[in-house]
Every structure is written in C-alpha cells, then in structure tokens.
Image: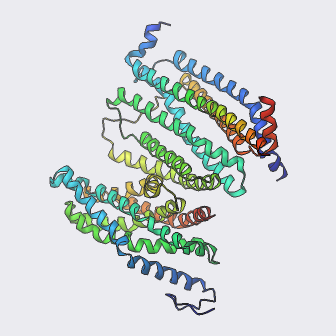
Amino acid sequence: MNWSEFIHMGGYGFYVWSSYGLALLVLLLNLYLPLRRRKSVRRLLHEFLRLKEQTR
Amino acid sequence: MSKQKSYCSCNSTDVPGFLKAIGCLLRRDLTVALRRSTDVLTPLVFFIIVVSLFPLGLGPEPSVLRTIAPGVIWVAALLATMLSLNRLFANDHADGTLEQMVLSPHPLTILVLTKVAAHWMLTGLPLVLISPLLAVQMNLPESAMGTLIFSLLLGTPVLSLLGAVGAALTLGLRGGGVLVSLLVLPLYTPVLIFGAGAVAGVTAGIDIEAHFSLLAAFLALALSLAPWAAAAALRVSLD
Amino acid sequence: MQYMHKYASPKFFYTLAGKLTPWIAALTALLLVAGLYLGLFVAPADYQQGESYRIMFIHVPAAWMSMFIYVCMAGAGAIALVWNVKLFEMFAGNCAPVGASFTFLALVTGSLWGKPMWGAWWAWDARLTSELILFFLYIGYMALEASIDDPRRAARASAILALVGVVNIPVIHFSVEWWNTLHQPASVSKIGTPSIHPSMLAPLLLMSLGFTFYFFTVALMRMRNEILERERHTTWVAQLLESKS
C-alpha cells in the first residue's frame, strides 16, 4: 500500500483524517474522564472515611 | 369550621364533585390570571414586537417579507408561549395551592389539563386572534390568512401542553425560563414545521390537507400524553 | 423480584462490573481495530464519492449510537421510575454525556463528509437536521439533571424528560424528512450511503458493534465511580478502600 496515497485519500485527506481524528479524540476523552473521576472519588472517600474515624 | 369565601359556591367542608372542581379551577385560574394582567399581556406584546423586528432587520421588501412571514410568525408564537410558561405552575407553587391540587382526590392529570386549558385561553388564543394583524404587517396574502389562523389554533394548544411538561419539570429551579426553553423548543419543531409549512404551502398553492391532519394528530397525541407526563413531573418536583 | 434485589444491589453490580469491564474493553478494541482495518485498507473506493465516503464508517455508527443511547437512556429511566431501582437511575444519567458525544461526532463528521460533496460546511440535510435536534435534546437532558441538586429528583425528572423525548423522536424524524423533501434544492443530495457493497457493510457493522461495546465499557466505568460515591456510608465501601490503600 502506497503510504502517501493513503494519507492523501484521493484529495479528501483533510476531511477523512479530521473525521477519524475527531472520533479518536471523542473516544479517548470519554475514557479519560471516568478514569480521572475515579481518582478523585477515591481521594474524596479516603478523606471522608478518615474524618468519620476521627469523629467516632 | 367557618365557611370560607371562595370563588365557587361549593361548601368548603365537602370535597366538590369532579366536574364542579374542574369548573372551579378553570374559573379560578382565569380570574387570577386576569388580575395579573401584565402576565397575560406581556407574551402578546412580545409576540408583536418580535414579528416587527424582522422587517427592521431584513428590510421592508414586500416579497421577502411574504416569503418569511409564515416562519417568522410561527417562531414568534413559539417564543411568546415559552415566555408565558412560568405562570402556569410557579405562582401556585409559591403559595402552596399546587400541593393542595396534588393532594386532592381528583385525578391530577385532569387538573393539569384544566390549568393548561386556562393558560391557553389567555396565551395561545390571543396569539391566534392577533395573528391576522401581524400577517398584514408581513405582507401575507389574504388567501393564507385562514390557514394561518387555523394552523395556530391547532398548534398553540400543543405548545401549551408540551410547555406544561417543561414547566412542571423545572418547577422552582434556578435555571428558570431559559432552562424550560432548552427543554421544550426541540420538542416544538414538528409543530413548527407543519404549522409554518401549511401557511407557506397555501401561498404556494400546494395541497395542505396533510399538514392539518398531522397538526390535528399532534394535538390528539399531546392531549392524551402531555397532561399525564406533566402530572408525573409535578409529583417528582414536589416530593 | 428477589433476583432483582440481589442483582440490583450496588455492591453486587460494582464487583460484577469490575470483572466485566476489562473483557468488554478488550472486545471493543478488537472490534474497532478490525473495523478500521477493513474500512480503511480493504474496502475499495466508491465509484461516485471516491475516498471521502470512508467518513461513513465513523459518521453512520456514531449516528446509530446517538439514537441507541437515547433509547437506552429513556428505557433505563422508565425502569427507574416504575420500579424505583437506583442502579437504573445511575445508568440513565451516565448515558447522556456519551450519547451527546456521539451525536456531536455524527454532526461534525456529517459536516466534514458534506463539504467535499456539497461545497458547504453545513446543509440542512434530513439526517443532519434530525441529529442536531437530537443534540439539543441531549443538552436539555444534561442541563435539567445539572440544575437539580437532589439526585433522586434529578434522576426522576430527567427520566420523564427522556421518555417525552423518546416519544417525540420518531415524530421529529418524520417531520424533518418531510420538511427536507419539500425544501431541498435539486443540487443538494442526501449524504447517501453509497450502494452498499459487502466489503463496505462489514466494516460498518464492526464499527457499530465496536462503538456499542465502547459505550458499555464507559457506562460501566462511570457507574462504578458513581456507586462508590453514593454508597460511601456503607461498610463494604469502607472495607474496599482499606484493602486497596
């Protein structure tokens, strides 16, 4: 497969690769957000449990 | 318990019969709304102003105005209805009447339908009645006038009914009027398409029987489903 | 009903989801890689549209997902309303951001597909217009949920909104289709799917399945987070965190 032809996509390269690129971005973002939230939830809960222990 | 003065001649210690309750509610809503006449007049004036803005924005060329008239009048009707939605439940919610209605033995769905009917009589119906004047302003041919009135007559109740669901869902929320618009305007699009389409169609000479059938179908669908959804939403909002 | 109580318990679901997620994620990756390979390398160029039609392998699955997720959201909301199951409430709420993302993706890729075809960045094509209205419905749903502080009320109000929306969606589709056929200038054609060649169908289906399992992966991840947060008062959460730290 000729790589430069592949990237060029018969003249439509910009449109095709923007679409696929955006799709990748959307998929990665929707994966990243729950992972980040998971960290903050754990931090929050550790704090919450620590306070609960203290005020017992 | 002393006999309290009420709008209806119902004995305050008995639960009024169903039809009497509805009659009471209708009369009450109309009376209260007419006392706060600004609430009723503001959407109407808004309707007139918005339509008048378009010639100012686009230029007074008669053929242009004629082309955009159906869409402009209909969109303005949508927006004016949106503005008026908060008076549907908010005032009753504030003074506790709404909770009484939810707790009453009568089916909440019918009570909601009654309130929406009162709302439409004072919001939608005036829009319908004043639309010919605006149609003249926008250079709409006289042949389309009847279609305009009839399409608004079928469409504005649907707007009030769907709007009631939105108003019930957003009862007491910070977002207020803008939030209701966000929720309800996408749902209005079919009514807009066929309502404005009917008026544009009659000007272009197309057969518009399908438009009216669909508008009637939307009305039937809204009448059967919207009060029920709005009642459910009220229960959720008041819990 | 007893099964319901066991399987609908947050703790059970949390552990189950934890075990399932890696497998579903792996399946997602597999499907997407296969779909991309077939779509980009194997499927031939279209007779009319050349290479640009390959955007279809993103646009069409994204559009399907936007619809599918909304229906899931409405269905879960209905179950949550009728049977009062917290788990379904959580699922419904977590559908919205992913659904809105796919709708957005469908809109932008539709625009990118349309530009070389029509010469304009946006055209009021029936499908794009329906997608746009669907996007507004998602935004409305998320706005409503965000405006209500009480999570219970938020979930139930959004569920009602989603149900009203789901009833409206066929009406909207129909109306927009009709509107489009009437107003369409002759030069603009629908972003037609090219006459589907089998070699084009396979990547389309693979991408759609891939997106579906992706959605499940993300939904499970989000739900696990929400369960932890909501169930923070329980002992099993406390024990879980202790064992992990």
Position of the C terminus of chain C, as image quadrant, is top right
Closest to the observer, B143 or C224: C224
Q: Percent x, y for residue A21?
A: 48, 23
* Res B200 visible: no
Left or right: B124, with B106 as reference point: left
Q: In the image shown, does B188 or B143 lie closer to the viewer?
A: B188
The picture quadrant where one finds residue B135 is bottom left
In-image side of C161 versus C31 (left or right): left
Q: Residue furthest right?
A: C2
Give left or right: position of B31 versus C153. left
Give the residue displayed 61% in from the left and 20% down from the top: C34
User: Can residue B91 be seen from the camera position used here?
Assistant: yes
Q: Which of A52 and C40 is in front in this view?
A: A52
Q: Residue furthest left?
A: B61
Q: In which quarter of the image is residue C212?
A: top right
**Residue B130 image point, x, y percent:** 28, 70
Residue positioned 23% across, 56% down in the render: B53
> Closest to the observer: B13 or C44?
B13
Q: Is residue B238 above or below residue C45?
A: below
Say if B86 sits above or below C129 in the image. Answer: below
Task: Name the residue: 81% across, 50% down.
Answer: C5
Q: In x, y percent, where is residue A4?
A: 43, 8
Q: Does residue B185 sit above or below B148 in this rendering?
A: above
| Residue C119, x across and y down, in percent | 31, 29
